[in-house]
Image (spheres, rainbow, N blue to C red):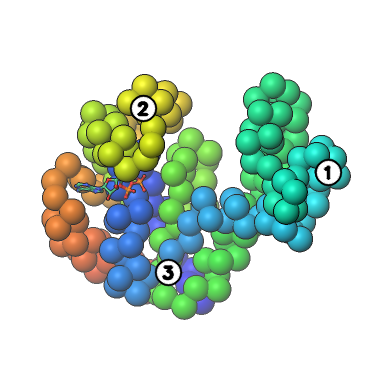
Amino acid sequence: MADYIIGLTGGIGSGKTTVANLFADLGVTLVDADIVAREVVSIGSKGLNAIVYHFGDSILLGDGHLDRSKLRERIFNHDDDRLWLNSLLHPLIRETMLEKCKEAQSNYVIMVVPLLFENGLDRLVHRTLLVDISPELQQQRTVARDAVSAKQVQNIIGSQATRAEKLSQADDVIDNHGEVSALKCKVNALNTLYLKLSSSA
Ligand code: ADP
């Protein structure tokens, strides 16, 4: 049972997934906020049942899954529904992530949370790790990875905390301006630190 949690964060395209996978290679359990956010509204979940009760069956696709684009459109146009949905999902996501951390068998857990500081989830973790890159590189790598325009990426970057804000809040920082191969050495060094911190916590 792991009770030492590292919150891994960084803007879109910064390299969170790449860094998280290197920790996983060392045997560290990952708890990914994006995956949990999908789980809490999966078929048969308490979350999806509450959503259907609130919005009606028309919020579902033909196969019973949540129609995410319909839900996004609905909350974009209705503030009260957005607040309702957030007050349903945020605690559910938080509780589920903490449960998964507790169940983990590794000495510590990496919680991967894109909006760790923005949503105040840094309060749930013992230490924070930021993957840092410039907005220009963030844009370049995201456009290369996803079918999105530079303008769309720019808008997403603009909606997230600034690089300076995140840098001022993080306990540890991994600079990801270099090659992927350079990350391994940095992850190894942090793993040594986190093993030490988790054993004396
Ligand atoms: P995030 O999870 O933060 O959105 P990813 O780990 O998916 O970021 O990285 C974004 C993209 O950039 C991916 O296609 C990834 O393979 C690539 N990438 C990550 N780090 C580097 C690097 N140091 N050099 C070149 N490409 C990288």
Q: How far apart are the two marked residues, 2 and 3, measured between alpha carbons?
A: 33 Å
The one nearer the camera, 164 or 196, is: 164
- Which one is closest to the eye, mark 1 or mark 3? 1
Q: Which mark is residue 45?
A: none
- Residue labelled with disc 1: 57
SS of the residue at dot 2?
loop
Classify residue 33 as left or right of residue 135.
Answer: right
- Residue labelled with disc 2: 149
* Label 1 packing within 10 angstroms: few (<14), some (14-19), many (20+): some
Whichever of labels 1 and 3 marks the residue nearer the N terminus, that label is 3
**x, y percentage for residue 196?**
30, 70
- Residue labelled with disc 3: 29
Which amino acid type is shown beneath numbered disc 1?
Asp
SS of the residue at dot 3?
strand
Does 93 sit above or below residue 135? Answer: below
Label 2 close to label 1 by CB (< 8 Å): no
